[in-house]
């Protein structure tokens, strides 16, 4: 009973573990996948569950990355500590920005988040003394995780470290989205006009969701900085913000396992398509995205649900 | 006794246009009060102003004696003033049960909870099913709202409002858009609501108004033209003129 309630979570975890044994040479690739999946999940709490779009979510990812890098550069080298601080810093930044984002409609939100993204990027670029500017930050070393597991060249520690973070994020968001608070977020998504008419504090719900989402994005960014030993401007740039939206769309926004698959699918596609044509891979991504919206209707998760329904109908 | 609703000189202006002008309305606790008037009379605008959908331009609103003029819509709901909408405002992708449960969870301030399952809250589900049983929708509880026929969706609209446990319920054309036979049964359910619940409703069908209302306020051009019992309103020449006059215009067109 409990297991079935976890739904697709268990098969996904088993697939990740199988990857460890089947493709030991690709552990670094898996690590970056887990990080992107955690980032995409944090974003989809906003778009898929609360129905609030953002084109600047990488701001929190990048903030987490720089936080972790700065901590390590200044002597706090234990990774989990870095994660917790990144969570708090990015969450706090999100909370401070909520007032700007929560007001208005989707269009104003897109423009405002886009603007915040550009501002943060330029700020990080200008603050060379702190962030290293366009050169990024690599002048730091990470200590062993919890003082026990040192990051190795094969990437085994990084693999399990990032997988553990993804599992925690997955479980936390799964619980949150099925909770009364999660139901309130879906209420906002389904009809934001009715919510005040049932006495709901819409702004507070959105502020909470935004803070949590920003905090988790920061954790994902911190894991990337820690496992790659690098923090750079592209981690909070527009492209990363746009990509996370594409991952959610491809996977099926509003579905937690779908978004994880979307992150994996997007990374694979990007890789495969740029191998075919380094120049025109955006075209391929665009076609696949359109197909996932118009043909699958709801991305990978939507296609899967439709398939299940058809199979059940036949049986 | 303090009236359930009391407005004094309530005014709502959009630029130069006065949607609601100097409306002073008194609705005693437990009464069934209808708001009628030709199209564009400002009925829905008055509902918006009363429930806090829009900020009023001037005047005051008291609910149960308390001045709520400057309170937000959500704050008014928490003080017992709930409305329904002329055009369904439902959580279309959620199930019928979730629609009603959400209102209960908000009322009990349980939507802060993010560490427990919403579906596992038996007390909430039980209460939601009671509200649904009241509007005869218990059998459809687990269906997504968008899959329901329009008439049933109108009843979900009411069930959600009931789940906020209002003291004053404002119904904006509760039977709008449904066939006559169904609007009858919707009003039969409204009639069956507890007597201590104050009802203010907007309705176009005069037959329903005269049957279910105890008092009627006639709104024309954003202002109160007259108020009285159904018999008085029925006998009022001016009211007849407002409606028949319009009908004649329609006939000529």
Image: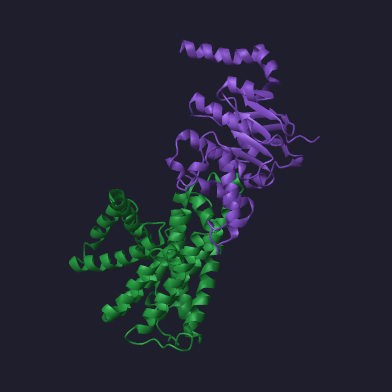
Q: Name the side, left or right, on which A177 lies relative to B9.
A: left
In the figure, what tint was chain B given?
purple
Residue located farthest toward the left when viewing the structure as drawn: A276
Q: Pick whichever, B198 or B134, lies toward us.
A: B134
Q: Position of residue A233 (x, y in %)?
A: 40, 72
In the rendered view, tell whether residue B200 sits above or below residue A63: above
In the image as oriented, which residue stretches furthest toward the front? A315
Image coordinates for residue A267, horizontal then vertical, percent? 30, 67
The percent position of residue A2, horizontal first and vertical second, equals 46, 66
In the visual, does B63 lie left or right of A63? right
Q: Quadrant of the C terminus of chain B?
A: top left
Would residue B55 be seen by someone viewing this image from the given angle?
no
Q: Could you say where residue B231 lies in the image, as x and y percent from the top left?
A: 69, 16
The structure residue drawn at horizontal position 42% and vertical position 64%, both measured from the top left corner, is A4
Q: Residue at x 57, y 47 (%)?
A: B128
- Looking at the image, which is closer to me, A111 or A301? A301
| Total residue callouts | 0
Spot the residue most to the right.
B1
Looking at this view, is A230 or B188 the one in front? B188
Chain identifier matching the green colour in the rendered picture: A
Instruction: Describe the colour scheme in one phrase.
Output: by chain
Q: Left or right of A118: which side holds B51? A: right
The residue depicted at 51 percent of the width and 25 percent of the height is B181
Task: Identify whether B54 is placed above or below A250.
Answer: above
Quarter containing the N terminus of chain B: top right
Asked if residue B183 can be seen in this view, the reply is yes
């Amino acid at each position: 009973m409990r297991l079935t309630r976890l739904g697709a979570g268990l098969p996904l975890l088993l697939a990740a573990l199988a990857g460890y044994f089947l493709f030991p040479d690709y552990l670094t690739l898996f690590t970056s996948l887990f990080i992107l999946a955690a980032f995409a999940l944090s974003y989809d709490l906003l778009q898929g569950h609360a129905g609030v779009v953002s084109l600047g979510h990488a701001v929190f990812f990048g903030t987490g990355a720089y936080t972790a890098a700065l901590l390590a550069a200044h002597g706090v080298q234990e990774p989990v500590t870095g994660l917790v601080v990144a969570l708090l810093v990015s969450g706090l930044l999100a909370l401070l920005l909520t007032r700007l984002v929560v007001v208005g409609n989707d269009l104003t939100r897109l423009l405002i988040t886009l603007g915040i993204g550009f501002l943060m990027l330029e700020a990080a670029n200008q603050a060379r003394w702190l962030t290293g500017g366009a050169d990024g930050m690599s002048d730091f070393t990470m200590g062993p995780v919890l003082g026990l597991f040192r990051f190795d060249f094969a990437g085994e520690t990084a693999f399990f470290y990032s997988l553990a973070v993804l599992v925690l994020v997955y479980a936390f968001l799964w619980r949150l989205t099925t909770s009364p608070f999660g139901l309130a977020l879906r209420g906002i998504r389904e009809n934001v006009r009715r919510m005040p008419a049932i006495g709901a504090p819409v702004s507070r719900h959105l502020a909470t969701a935004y803070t949590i989402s920003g905090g988790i994005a920061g954790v994902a960014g911190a894991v990337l900085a820690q496992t790659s030993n690098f923090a750079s401007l592209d981690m909070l740039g527009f492209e990363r913000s746009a990509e996370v939206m594409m991952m959610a769309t491809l996977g099926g926004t509003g579905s937690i396992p779908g978004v994880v698959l979307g992150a994996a699918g997007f990374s694979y596609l990007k890789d495969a398509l740029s191998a075919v044509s380094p120049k025109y891979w955006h075209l391929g991504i665009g076609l696949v995205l359109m197909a996932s919206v118009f043909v699958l209707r709801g991305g990978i998760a939507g296609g899967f649900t439709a398939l299940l329904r058809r199979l059940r109908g036949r049986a | 006794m303090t009236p359930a609703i009391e407005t004094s000189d309530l005014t709502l202006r959009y630029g130069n246009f006065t949607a609601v002008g100097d409306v002073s309305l008194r609705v005693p606790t437990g009464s069934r009060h209808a708001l009628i008037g030709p199209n564009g009379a400002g009925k829905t605008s008055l509902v918006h102003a009363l429930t806090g959908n829009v900020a009023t331009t001037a005047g005051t609103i008291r609910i149960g004696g308390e001045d709520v003029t400057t309170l937000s819509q959500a704050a008014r709901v928490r003080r017992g003033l709930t409305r329904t909408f002329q055009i369904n405002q439902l959580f279309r992708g959620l199930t019928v049960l979730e629609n009603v449960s959400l209102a209960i969870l908000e009322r009990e301030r349980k939507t802060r909870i993010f560490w427990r399952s919403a579906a596992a809250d038996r007390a909430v589900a039980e209460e939601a099913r009671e509200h649904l049983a009241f509007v005869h929708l218990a059998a459809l509880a687990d269906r997504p709202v968008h899959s329901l026929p329009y008439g049933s969706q109108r009843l979900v609209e009411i069930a959600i409002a009931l789940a906020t446990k209002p003291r004053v319920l404002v119904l904006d054309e509760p039977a709008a858009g449904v066939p006559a036979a169904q609007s009858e049964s919707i009003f039969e359910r409204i009639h069956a609501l507890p007597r201590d619940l104050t009802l203010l409703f907007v309705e176009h069908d005069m037959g329903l108004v005269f049957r279910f209302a105890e008092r009627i306020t006639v709104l024309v051009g954003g202002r109160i033209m007259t108020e009285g019992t159904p018999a008085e309103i029925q006998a009022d020449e001016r009211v007849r003129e407002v409606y028949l006059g319009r009908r004649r215009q329609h006939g000529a067109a």
